[in-house]
Amino acid sequence: MLSVTNLHKSYQVGKTTYEVLKGISMEIEKGEFVAVMGPSGSGKTTLLNCISCYIPADDGSILLSDMELARLDEDALAKVRNQKLGFVFQDFLLLDGLTVRQNILLPAIIGGTVNPQAENRADQLCQVFGISAIQNKYPAEISGGEKQRTAVARALINHPLLILADEPTGNLDSKSTRAVISAFEQAKSALDATIFMVTHDSYAASFCDRVIILKDGVVWRTMIHNHEGDEMQDRLDFQDRLLDAIREMGKE
């Protein structure tokens, strides 16, 4: 699904070069829910921006279903971002003048593909994420969790290969955070979505199948969540393992 190989990215500030990504490699399989964690400056957001090609990598390969993204021109990249990638941002980025349903349809509107199939897809997504009752409301009239579930639905309207989520629970309380994670779980189970989430939140990460921990621009450790036994206890145990790993990294 997604293959990142030996990815490098540096920034030049004056005469000083800051190396942010130092040869990162990873694989994301179809249907996986994967998180990337790490301290500030570890390269999490830069990695996400390189995968989406909003910033160019200096070296390395990014393959999305056998498409080498770095070799595409800007028009082809725009098409990939609209049709093959779904985006969920920390600040929702819903349009205030559009209803929930219209916001969900926005990528199809931009792509000129609003047809009965897209309309049915929007209705299906509203049902999957439990927002059918608010589909005719405007963003100012709904809660933070409902806004983020709308954003997840919007990310899925064009049947993307991959959802990229940048700190999607960063501004939310615990109840809204759980609602957003439930939306991702529902997207994974009901729609076979593949999700790549950058987060600093061990609670949100504890629901993932795998957590990749970055440190100083490299993959420091990969944590596997086997989803065994009692669901709640299993998740708490995995969160404890994540916190132990972060504490260990801090001591180093």
Image: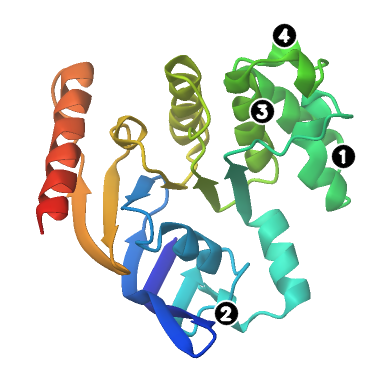
Q: How far apart are marks 4 and 1 (CA)?
A: 22 Å
Q: Which mark is residue 115?
A: 1
At x 81%, y 15%, the residue is 137
* Image location (x, y in percent) of residue 28: 37, 57
Look at the image and tell me whether residue 113 can be seen.
no
For discs 1 and 2, the disc positioned in front in the rendered view = 2
Direction front: furthest residue:
14
Q: Upstream in the sequence, badge 4 or badge 3?
A: 4
The kind of residue tagged 2 is Ala
CB atoms of marks 1 and 3 within 8 Å: no
Identify whether 33 is placed above or below 67.
above
The reply, left or right, for residue 25 in relation to residue 223 is right
At x 67%, y 25%, the residue is 124
Label 1 neighbour load within 10 Å: few <14, some 14-19, many 20+: few
Q: Residue 231 carries which label?
A: none
Q: Distance between the residues labelled 4 and 2?
A: 41 Å
Identify whether 39 is placed above or below 156.
below
What secondary structure is marked by label 3? helix
What secondary structure is marked by label 2? helix
* Image location (x, y in percent) of residue 83: 69, 55
For discs 1 and 3, the disc positioned in front in the rendered view = 3
Q: Which mark is residue 150?
A: 3
* Image location (x, y in percent) of residue 108: 80, 45
